[in-house]
Image: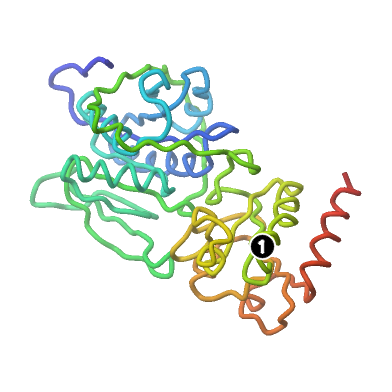
């Protein structure tokens, strides 16, 4: 177990859940660290990162450049795979170790689920998809409330609210802040933490297959190739998979595709799916219903391939190709392969 802090130590830490993928710390986690650091700037001196994975994969130097002063890692020998309640129970244990005043997580599927479990365990409310937070006056005394701004309806509106309770539990909208390192970060020491878990904490565990995308997250991918009804069926996604691979991206889909059972819900882009913020969103055979646009509207560039020149998504596109996917996609793939 990690050692407890000295008696009398004041609440002095913001805990931040940091997710790892095949390439290291996820972009959403770097954004969450930047957000958490803004809470630390309000008088809380320590920013602690919590990671699940092998200690030798923890990039302490990178964490230090993002203001992390302490790093706790839970290795696979103690907790292998993704177990949301066990992750939440681990964070609860670290609350007593660090006397944290807040727990922050990226607004990803994992981050949101883990903090929801932590809220149920601690009895504290959680503010999801936050874009800003600052101390607010409260009858309970200084440091017991935050004024938060958070996205609702997939970012279509911003809600201002007061979050009361200690520790404060927040997830950070994946496009809320840019990942910004500090000017003079110091590499933190990495402590191996052994959580105290009960068998019921491990009842639900998940193993995620990296698949063809190499483990990249739809929420943080730089390139997303989207497919809709116009793809025609499950077999129509093979060319999109190849194109996404050549572009170093992942495949996303519209709601109708998941409703038809052509692709899993984890790939759905939209209000009831994942909100994406890529550099490029290549939308293939997607009409662009308002629910879908709520999920892809933050893409920096939208390129549309569609046979319908009046499809609603064209109004939001930077470029459009009016043509048959069966002709356009193979031509793109061939051009990319020729370019090398």
Residue at the farthest bottom position: 310
Tally of numbered discs: 1
Side (left or right) of 62 relative to 320: left
Side (left or right) of 157 relative to 215: left
Label 1 belongs to which residue? 301
Q: In front here: 190 or 269?
A: 269
Side (left or right) of 284 relative to 33: right
Placement of the N terminus among the 4 image quadrants: top left
Residue at the farthest left position: 139
Residue at the farthest right position: 338
Q: Quadrant of the rendered structure where residue 33 is?
A: top left
Q: Please determine whether, in this image, residue 111 is positioned above or below residue 317.
A: above
Image coords of residue 262 (percent x, y): 58, 61
Q: In front here: 7 or 81?
A: 81
Q: Residue at x 72, y 74 (%)?
A: 306
Image coords of residue 172 (percent x, y): 40, 49
Image coords of residue 120 (percent x, y): 20, 45
Image coords of residue 223 (percent x, y): 66, 52
Q: Please determine whether, in this image, residue 298 is positioned above or below residue 38.
A: below
Q: Quadrant of the rendered structure where residue 330 is?
A: bottom right
Side (left or right) of 12 relative to 69: left
Q: Please determine whether, in this image, residue 141 is positioned above or below residue 273.
A: above
Disc 1: CA contacts within 10 A as few (<14), some (14-19) or many (>=20): some
Determine the secondary structure under disc 1.
strand
Q: How is the image coloured?
A: rainbow
Q: Residue at x 41, y 17 (%)?
A: 189
Q: Residue at x 11, y 45 (%)?
A: 141
Placement of the C terminus among the 4 image quadrants: top right
Q: In front here: 130 or 250?
A: 250
Q: Residue at x 79, y 62 (%)?
A: 329
Q: Please determine whether, in this image, residue 133 is positioned above or below residue 91.
A: below
């Amino acid at each position: 177990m990690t050692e407890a802090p000295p008696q009398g130590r004041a609440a002095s830490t913001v805990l931040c859940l940091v997710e790892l993928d095949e390439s290291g710390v996820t972009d959403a986690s770097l954004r969450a660290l930047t957000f958490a650091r803004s809470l630390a700037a309000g008088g809380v001196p320590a920013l602690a990162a919590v990671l699940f994975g092998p200690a030798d994969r923890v990039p302490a130097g990178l964490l230090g450049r993002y203001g992390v002063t302490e790093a706790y890692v839970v290795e696979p020998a103690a907790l292998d795979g993704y177990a949301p309640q066990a992750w939440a129970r681990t964070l609860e244990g670290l609350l007593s170790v660090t006397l944290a005043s807040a727990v922050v997580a990226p607004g990803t599927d994992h981050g949101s689920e883990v903090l929801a479990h932590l809220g149920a365990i601690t009895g504290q409310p959680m503010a999801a998809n936050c874009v800003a937070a600052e101390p607010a006056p409260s009858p309970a005394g200084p440091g017991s409330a935050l004024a938060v701004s958070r996205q609702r309806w997939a970012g279509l509106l911003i809600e201002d609210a007061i979050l009361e309770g200690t520790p404060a539990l927040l997830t950070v909208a994946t496009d809320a802040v840019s990942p910004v390192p500090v000017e003079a970060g110091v590499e933190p020491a990495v402590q191996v933490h052994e959580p105290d878990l009960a068998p019921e904490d491990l009842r639900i565990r998940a193993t995620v297959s990296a698949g063809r995308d190499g483990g990249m997250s739809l929420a943080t991918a730089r390139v997303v190739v989207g497919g809709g009804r116009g793809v025609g069926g499950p077999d129509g996604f093979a060319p999109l998979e190849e194109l996404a691979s050549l572009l170093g991206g992942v495949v996303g889909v519209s709601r109708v595709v998941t409703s038809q059972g052509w692709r899993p819900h984890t790939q759905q882009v939209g209000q009831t799916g994942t909100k994406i913020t890529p550099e490029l969103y290549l939308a293939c055979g997607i009409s662009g219903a308002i629910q879908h646009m709520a999920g892809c509207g933050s893409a920096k560039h939208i390129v549309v391939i569609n046979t319908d020149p009046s499809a609603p998504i064209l109004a939001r596109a930077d470029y459009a190709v009016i043509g048959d996917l069966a002709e356009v996609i193979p031509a793109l793939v061939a051009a990319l392969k020729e370019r090398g």
